[in-house]
Amino acid sequence: QANPLPALDPGSLPFELPNNWAWSRWGEFILDIEQSAPDAAKPGDFVIAKKSTEERIGRSALGRDTTAESTDGEVIMRLRMSEAVDPKFFHLTNNSPAGRGYYASQATSVDNGFKEIEPQVVTHMPFPIPPRGEQARIVAKVEKLMALCDELELRRKERDEQRVKALQIAVHEALEEA
């Protein structure tokens, strides 16, 4: 890395971490950043929206989702990461509310309502990093919770459909009696 990353100011960090965690910057774990068009992304790439709408600027996609709407934009950054970081953990952290807020505060306005971030914005992003094993446990827990949320959403939709059918039957029967 050509330029050393600036030190993190302990007074600016939002919260204290457990003893085995550390505050860091993504640049300590990014081996390479390459700018490209979205259609250049390949399965297995880790991509971040470099130039996109305010809602999508900085959003990342991982693996097979690299062409997904989450990174829809005019320009993306393809990243190669150190093995010290679980790519799914990076993805979760990057797309977290804290990550979204960071990118929103760092993005510059360009043309047609688009925002843009430079690679330096990504490499300078502060984040809390646990040991590699704990990263995997966090990812597994989040995936389990997201699967539960998906299941609950499906059940809610099924109940809503049943309610609509019951209401339609009740209305139909009431009209037949009248």
Image (cartoon, rainbow, N blue to C red):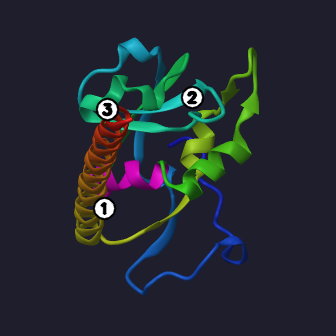
Instruction: Inspect the image, locate mark 2, and give the three-letter code of the amino acid beneath it.
Output: Lys
Q: CA separation, marks 1 and 2?
A: 26 Å
**Label 3 vs label 1: CA separation?**
51 Å
Label number found at residue 176: 3
- For this orientation, the residue located farthest to the front is 178
Eye-nearest disc, 3 or 2: 3
Query: For numbered disc 2, what is the local secondary structure?
Result: strand
Answer whether labels 3 and 2 touch (C-beta < 8 Å): no
Q: Looking at the rendering, which quadrant does residue 174 occupy?
A: top left
Residue 142 - label: 1
> Which amino acid lies under the numbered mark 1 shown in the image of this protein?
Val
> Do we see residue 77 in this rendering?
no
* Picture quarter with the C terminus: top left
Residue underneath mark 2: 50
Depicted 42 relative to depicted 147: above or below: above
Q: Alpha-carbon neighbours of circle 1 within 10 Å: few (<14), some, or many (≥20)?
A: some
Magenta residues, start to end: 83-94
The number of numbered badges drawn on the structure is 3
